[in-house]
Image: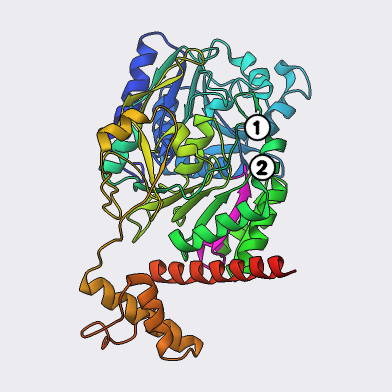
């Protein structure tokens, strides 16, 4: 018996794939949101196929995905071999899992009929199937033209928005992101848009911003400092994955985080497996607070410890956008939501992660469409006080209500406006919490007793009195610590500006 029980939508996924096979479709694209458990679904499909005498070949885009898939096959009591550089092959197994890079190289070694590495499989799985139109995949798949090919992806389109109909002949979409959030299998996002650069002069290449010009626009001292400063204000203390434009930009962000005493590390595709694993271990245990990466963790990585996604990389690609944001949606003990800080205008341009999308196989105009728009979502607004991105009449975080909302909507054709918000009303319990934690922080740093009171007045607009003044000290939580860190960064930057003006 398998060591796991399929969830309802996972069973539905298996049944939908089988239904398409009965219709005569052999090239099936299965669309599953990040965190839906695609390896369990493929494991169940493989188990049923092997019982009927089929041989399986599973092609993965990264090495760690091979190990994950082999583990799932083991859960299904499927003995599988690995075809991967540095690993001894077990070619007698009825199921083989390989990286596309290694498999495409090895089947070129000699003629197919004499090549020991060629797997004469009747069923082929393709993970991250939005890569299927690349030359490496097509060179392999030409040997499986009459076989069953099942591709799985969360984003079934190219960066240009073009659908995958050139290869697949049917598409199956059993569950949406919002459906998984409603059932508790993913956590919802909370979105902030504190800044967005002017990208009007950055050219578009292959459906996305040209990277060199984009890096030049984003990698400036002001914007780099803006990323770190707003992180301290909005998500200070949270385990964060930052997506940068290129290596130079990522390393500049790391230096800025570290300059303010925040533990941060850089990773990119050129880092070896040992470096990546060691860095992730430090991130998972909290020694490293922030990882800045370049195109490395946009797909196929399970890091549920991520509490915040920082988008320092603007994009026009719906696929890249969803892959980046989706890294934060996996559940974790004590994690009820994840924060998204958008410095590239991506949310305004491409929407929220939870938006329901209906995917298609046809060209650019038909590859996807919003299946269900959010209520009253004529425009998105960015609250100037708390930076929350929202739709409708009222900010869900600080409850600012937009006056003359209907007329403002009529006046806004395409451009977001920053709206001034009223001061949030704090309860007595809120005030007690803040003063208690400010006192703790001041005592731990050896500050004078009046420091906490002045900081409290800066935050609340009043001095601590009565029940608020007499509370015992408490260690600051992420919200309070983040606000303090933001204030420190703001003070340092203002001092630097004054010194520069004086010079």
> Could one spot residue 283 in this view of the protein?
yes
Quadrant (top left, top right, bottom left, bottom right) of the C terminus = bottom right
Residue 197 position within the rendered picture, expressed as x and y whole percent measured from the top left: 57, 42
Q: Secondary structure at mark 1?
A: loop
**Could you tell me which residue is drawn at 57 percent across and 27 percent down?**
159
Judged left or right of residue 37, residue 496 is: right
279, above or below 353, in the image: below
Numbered-mark total:
2
Q: Quadrant of residue 227?
A: bottom right
Residue 464: name its quadrant: bottom left
CA gap between label 2 and label 1 equals 8 Å
Task: Give 438 or 275, whichever is nearer the viewer.
Answer: 438
Q: Which residue is mark 1?
A: 202
Q: Which residues are magenta?
A: 283-296
| Pointer 2 residue | 217
| Residue at 51% over, 16% down | 364
């Amino acid at each position: 018996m398998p060591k796991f029980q399929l969830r309802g939508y996972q069973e539905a996924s298996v049944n939908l794939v089988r239904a398409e096979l009965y219709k005569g479709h052999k090239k099936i694209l299965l669309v599953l949101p990040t965190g839906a458990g695609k390896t369990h679904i493929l494991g169940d499909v493989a188990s049923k196929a092997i019982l009927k005498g089929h041989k399986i070949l599973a092609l993965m885009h990264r090495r760690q995905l091979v190990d994950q898939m082999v583990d799932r096959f083991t859960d299904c009591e499927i003995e599988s071999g690995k075809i991967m550089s540095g690993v001894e092959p077990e070619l007698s197994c009825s199921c083989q899992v390989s990286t596309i890079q290694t498999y495409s190289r090895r089947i070129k070694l000699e003629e197919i009929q004499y090549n020991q590495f060629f797997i004469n499989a009747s069923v082929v799985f393709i993970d991250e199937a939005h890569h299927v139109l690349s030359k490496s995949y097509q060179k392999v798949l030409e040997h499986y033209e009459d076989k069953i090919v099942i591709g799985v992806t969360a984003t079934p389109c190219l960066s240009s928005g073009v659908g995958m109909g050139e290869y697949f002949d049917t598409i199956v979409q059993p569950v949406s992101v919002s459906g998984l959030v409603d059932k508790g299998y993913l956590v919802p996002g909370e979105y902030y848009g504190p800044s967005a650069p002017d990208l009007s002069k950055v050219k578009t290449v292959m459906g996305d911003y040209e990277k060199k010009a984009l890096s030049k626009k984003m990698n400036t001292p002001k914007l780099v400092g803006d990323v770190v400063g707003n992180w301290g204000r909005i998500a200070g203390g949270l385990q964060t994955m930052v997506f940068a434009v290129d290596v130079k930009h990522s390393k500049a962000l790391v230096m800025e985080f570290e300059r303010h005493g925040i533990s941060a590390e850089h990773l990119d595709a050129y880092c070896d497996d040992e470096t990546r694993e060691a860095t992730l271990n430090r991130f998972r245990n909290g020694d490293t607070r922030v990882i800045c990466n370049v195109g490395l963790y946009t797909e196929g990585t399970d890091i549920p410890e991520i509490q915040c996604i920082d988008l320092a990389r603007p994009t026009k690609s719906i696929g890249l956008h969803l892959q980046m944001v989706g890294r934060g949606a996996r559940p974790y003990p004590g994690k009820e939501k994840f924060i998204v800080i958008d410095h590239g205008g991506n949310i305004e341009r491409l929407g929220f992660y939870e938006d329901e999308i209906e995917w298609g196989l046809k060209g650019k105009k038909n590859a996807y469409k919003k299946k269900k728009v959010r209520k009253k979502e004529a425009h998105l607004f960015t609250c100037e006080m708390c930076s929350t991105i929202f739709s409708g009449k009222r900010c869900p975080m600080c409850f600012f209500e937009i006056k003359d909302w209907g007329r403002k909507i009529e006046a806004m054709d395409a451009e977001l406006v920053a709206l001034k918000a009223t001061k949030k009303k704090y309860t007595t319990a809120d005030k007690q919490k803040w003063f208690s934690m400010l006192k703790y922080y001041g005592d731990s740093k050896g500050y004078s007793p009046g420091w906490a009171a002045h900081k409290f007045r800066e935050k609340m607009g009043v001095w601590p009195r009565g029940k608020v003044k007499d509370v015992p000290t408490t260690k600051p939580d992420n919200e309070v610590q983040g606000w303090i860190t933001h204030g420190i960064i703001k003070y340092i930057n203002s001092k630097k500006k004054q010194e520069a003006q004086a010079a």
